[in-house]
Image (cartoon, coloured by chain):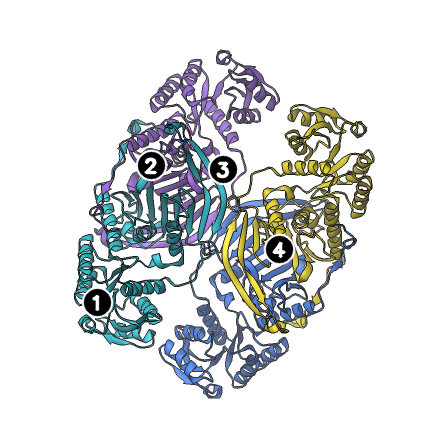
Chain colours: A blue, B yellow, C purple, D cyan
Amino acid sequence: MATRLRVAVIGAGYWGPNLARNFRSSADWELAAIVDLDRARAQKVADSVGGVLVLTDVEDALTDASIDAVAIATPARTHHPLAMRALAAGKHVVVEKPIADSSERAREMVDEAERRGLVLMTDHTYCYTPAVQKIRELVADGSLGDILFIDSTRINLGLVQPDVDVFWDLAPHDLSIIDFVLPGGLAPTQVAAYGADPIGAGKSCVGYLMMPLQNGGMAHVHVNWMSPTKIRQMVIGGTRRTLVWDDLNPQQRISVYDRGVDLLRQTGFETDRATATVSYRLGDTWSPALSEREALSAMTEEFAGAIRDRRSARTDGYSGLRVLEVLEAASRSLAASEAFTPVRGALAASV
Amino acid sequence: MATRLRVAVIGAGYWGPNLARNFRSSADWELAAIVDLDRARAQKVADSVGGVLVLTDVEDALTDASIDAVAIATPARTHHPLAMRALAAGKHVVVEKPIADSSERAREMVDEAERRGLVLMTDHTYCYTPAVQKIRELVADGSLGDILFIDSTRINLGLVQPDVDVFWDLAPHDLSIIDFVLPGGLAPTQVAAYGADPIGAGKSCVGYLMMPLQNGGMAHVHVNWMSPTKIRQMVIGGTRRTLVWDDLNPQQRISVYDRGVDLLRQTGFETDRATATVSYRLGDTWSPALSEREALSAMTEEFAGAIRDRRSARTDGYSGLRVLEVLEAASRSLAASEAFTPVRGALAASV
Amino acid sequence: MATRLRVAVIGAGYWGPNLARNFRSSADWELAAIVDLDRARAQKVADSVGGVLVLTDVEDALTDASIDAVAIATPARTHHPLAMRALAAGKHVVVEKPIADSSERAREMVDEAERRGLVLMTDHTYCYTPAVQKIRELVADGSLGDILFIDSTRINLGLVQPDVDVFWDLAPHDLSIIDFVLPGGLAPTQVAAYGADPIGAGKSCVGYLMMPLQNGGMAHVHVNWMSPTKIRQMVIGGTRRTLVWDDLNPQQRISVYDRGVDLLRQTGFETDRATATVSYRLGDTWSPALSEREALSAMTEEFAGAIRDRRSARTDGYSGLRVLEVLEAASRSLAASEAFTPVRGALAASV
Amino acid sequence: MATRLRVAVIGAGYWGPNLARNFRSSADWELAAIVDLDRARAQKVADSVGGVLVLTDVEDALTDASIDAVAIATPARTHHPLAMRALAAGKHVVVEKPIADSSERAREMVDEAERRGLVLMTDHTYCYTPAVQKIRELVADGSLGDILFIDSTRINLGLVQPDVDVFWDLAPHDLSIIDFVLPGGLAPTQVAAYGADPIGAGKSCVGYLMMPLQNGGMAHVHVNWMSPTKIRQMVIGGTRRTLVWDDLNPQQRISVYDRGVDLLRQTGFETDRATATVSYRLGDTWSPALSEREALSAMTEEFAGAIRDRRSARTDGYSGLRVLEVLEAASRSLAASEAFTPVRGALAASV
């Protein structure tokens, strides 16, 4: 093991303590400092990990040449200024999601990191769970074949957020995961979003998001704050197999079905689509064993690996940027009052 | 019990035998004849119900004054001409779904029945299952409150149909059920449909359909021929309670959750939406016992009741018409290449 | 394909029509006659399979030299006399379960068939389902390793039978399946049965049956007429893998878990049990695809195969005999008022 | 609120920190001290609750007149001496389960507490979960009617314990819960236990325990360390309704089924059992909402309530004693090599 990298955690609110605990217990990292304007809050986090330097001025961390990296866990609107200052000070940066409060500012961060040759990583924690790691692996090694469709459902009785709608609250999880597991990342050129606000909350509480995939496929995300039952499920259909991830079933989170539909094309002469034969595979189901590793532990390892190998992190700044771009397009789609086709004769229908 | 009504079943193919068997065992009906151009096929159905008159010419049934009604179970394109002739002959008519092969022809049938004061019923069989009957009852008696959203999923590894896409194959079930349980019936003025054809079948194999409901709510239908797992689920969210219908769980098909989100509005002065308080109910769950009655038996009873009471059937011609109008609008929406919003910067994204 | 064997079905009650239908559609068999004292009942079954000879006297079938075999589907008390006469007439015999109304009479049947070199088969239909066939295969090919324990649950809200208790009503299924899948068959030398009759039905309505397996293992069967939920589950634990069969989950009836407990023994010197190390395997889960074949179709094929190959059927007379012997021992165990150990001090306990 | 009671937690190992945290956050209690022979370990627990007196000699706590009670969370063999000394010092006592390492010593503790008029409570934590509290309530208010049978399953891939068998490891949970919810407590006069040790661990790894209930009913407990799937389920059948508790289903832990079997007895003249008519109820299912309260918080409240009201705690010393008595009887039953009935003819069976 090489010398440990030194990191300062900026922000001692909700997420900071988790970061501090995982950097502390990592073989790759030395936790160098906790930074928060509120010294008492920072001290409490420092105590919880057995003691570490407490700072109230972020400059003290940025000017400390022994510190290699910072982990930013502050409110979203401060991500950009803090990350830009840290990059300017030559520090590698990992930022809690969302990477910034707009794609424009996220792009500035990405460009700055690239110019300086520093690692800029988005902490898309879900991507580092054993389940999502396994999904990425199965897509990458061709077990599923080409991806035909993705259908993701993330619904429950949820808190109506004061500042964001259900898309911005829940869909970042689905989008960052799709970005992580697809070989080409999340790269839709267009989206369509439909939302409903049946309780008059002033924002969408039920939302549907559609994104064309390559080759005629489609990704669909259903987010909902009003469902009495909780569902966390993603189906990824491929040409070879279909994977179902049910995150609420600890006994069988991932199922890989060797079932599917194939279109058989005759070779040697042109086959009309209408005459192409469809066949069905009805094979076995397989559920891989998953490790029990904590996601943030794998995240900190990836951050260290990216710095040491001078490579992009798996969830780099671009992945954070792509998620923001899709969410912004979804908001524009909603603002355009969505796009419906009139039902003919409906108004005249006797009911 | 009044005198039994007399019915002829027209069509001895897939559905006719089921109709014949249920009319035969009904206390309301006397099965008068089986009509099919293919005498042998008609005879086989007649034998299976213990013997009944077999006819090969539909005119013989229509000119028989002792016959009150006909049940049409022939290919969709023949529904309109057969129904129009039957209505002209003064017979009440029940038609297998879809009521016709276009909404225009369906409207002619509806108008003709109305003009003649005859019952025209669509055999939306699913609506007569004990589960859907119970759902209608719970909506009607206010147990759910006002309907806020409907989310219906009907997916499985399905046969790719030669003549219709996944919307026309599967969504009629969801649409006829929504039409049946909503107090105002299925009355969207607009729809949006998104489909995917990732295997190059020449038609949508995965489909999503959105319809605004009154008061800001939305109905969403997901149909899919490519899912390795089978799901038949409808969630109906209301202001008072939310109902989940899981048709593949015979031990608990319907669950009524006394859980939900309420927006509390202060009275006495204008409340800004943003400051309205949201509250959560986390009450009991209740699963009503359902009868075991066969759906077609309830359908034949409703047909008789409508004729005797000179009223519309619950699934009358208009319900068949409304389903067709929504499907036609969905097809137009698809043909318009759907409606997407571009993702800014996406094409330039480094992946 | 060799010449078809000819079979007469004796008994046109509940099970006879199923046998007739499957023999009729089999490539191995020619359905020769339906025999029942009640000619009308026999005729109805004959009609339902498209017509076949109807007999009211079983002797007419037994003296017909063109008939190779009989399938007996009459009340249990008549199995012995009918089978003995058929064997005496040189016919191969398959008998609906239970093979006889006592193990003594079953043994006479088995001995008679053996003496005459005829096939005597018990129609343990469940053993011919695709799931049980697959389980037998997985046990036989060593996928599970040595069998350590079997736990079978067969509970639901059931009809309280007038003539038998819950053991005799439900446990024959579990016992015949265990007999079928274990390499050595169902061979316990002792059993213990515990029953409860909390509603005063005069017989056990809830029952537990324990049977030691070889090597310190145990089989346990729970049968219950009073459970509001229905469960049909069997767990078969082996040294290599453990199999769970959930017959009410059509999407995943069989799951094979590569999880288990191993006792590691050091070699080279004596290891005290207390110091033996236990290890845990936490591997993948696998669910084999199952065919959709009807069980009775596979049963008729096995009957033909046994006759043609002059071998025992997989569910031969001995398997029927073994099931009866275990049930009789269970009844004796119950009649002996079971065997309990007193709780010391319990009567004096202050409650 | 009256003055807070003062408590010392004895033992800073696995369970002590949980007790300390809950006493600390209770409105009823003031956490007075953490006692452990290992000062560093005690200090760590003290720090984790924000600081409290640390003691290494239990006498210092027992001689402190300001301390009202002690909570003992030390190894089982030390429960008796510590509790006896605490009672002698006039302290109320709550003891982690098992209350002692033998029923004889438990009885001494119970007698001592009674003589001195002090509260002696067993920390059967599971009984204070919202689910078990609700079950007790439903049994007590007659919602289930008279209890007919109880079937409890607690199986998973578990650690083979070095010092106890699967009965002593897992069944105390089931037994303490049954004791808690039955109006008369756990009061079997006899038990039968059957165990299997198929891996040669030197102790039962699979176990079945049967206990007659009053009125012909039976309780059955299945504990198993070798199951690849985890089940935590208890079915309580009553004359009016049946309850199923599935502790691994957070969305519906408790289901109350209004389904069951009734034996109708005719009045006016003697009815033979055989002619009594059975009827079936097929009513609704109901799942009560449960609070989210932590079990140990409710336990500390009950401990305070018992002291203040000078009454027995709900899980008093007797409940701990009864659980021990049943486990000891189960061990005797096992040691007697269980009680089996021979299967006649089995050895001669051809397999």
Number of residues whose C-alpha sits closer than 10 Å to that of mark 1, classed few (under 14), some (14–19) or many (20 or more)? many
Q: Are marks 3 and 4 in contact (CB under 8 Å)?
A: no
Label 4: which secondary element: strand
Q: Residue at x 44, y 73 (%)?
A: A18
Q: Magenta residues? A: C154-162
Q: Residue at x 28, y 55 (%)?
A: D161
Which residue lies under the disc numbered 1? D91
Chain letter of disc 4? Answer: B
Question: Which of label 3 and label 4 is nearer to you?
Answer: 4
Question: Which of label 2 and label 1 is nearer to you?
Answer: 1
Determine if marks 2 and 3 fall on one subunit: yes
The foreground one among C285 and A267 is: C285
Determine if marks 4 and 2 fall on one subunit: no
Residue C298 x/y as whole percent: 50, 31
Which residue lies under the disc numbered 4? B151
B87 left or right of D29? right
Spatial separation of the CA atoms under disc 4 and disc 1: 60 Å
Chain letter of disc 3? Answer: C
The foreground one among A72 and B310 is: B310
Q: Is residue A11 above or below residue A199?
A: below
Asked whether residue C278 is in view, the answer is: yes
Question: Which of label 3 and label 1 is nearer to you?
Answer: 1
Q: Amino acid at mark 3?
A: Pro
Q: Are marks 2 and 3 in contact (CB under 8 Å)?
A: no
Which residue lies under the disc numbered 3? C130
Number of residues whose C-alpha sits closer than 10 Å to that of mark 3, classed few (under 14), some (14–19) or many (20 or more)? some
Q: Are marks 4 and 1 in contact (CB under 8 Å)?
A: no
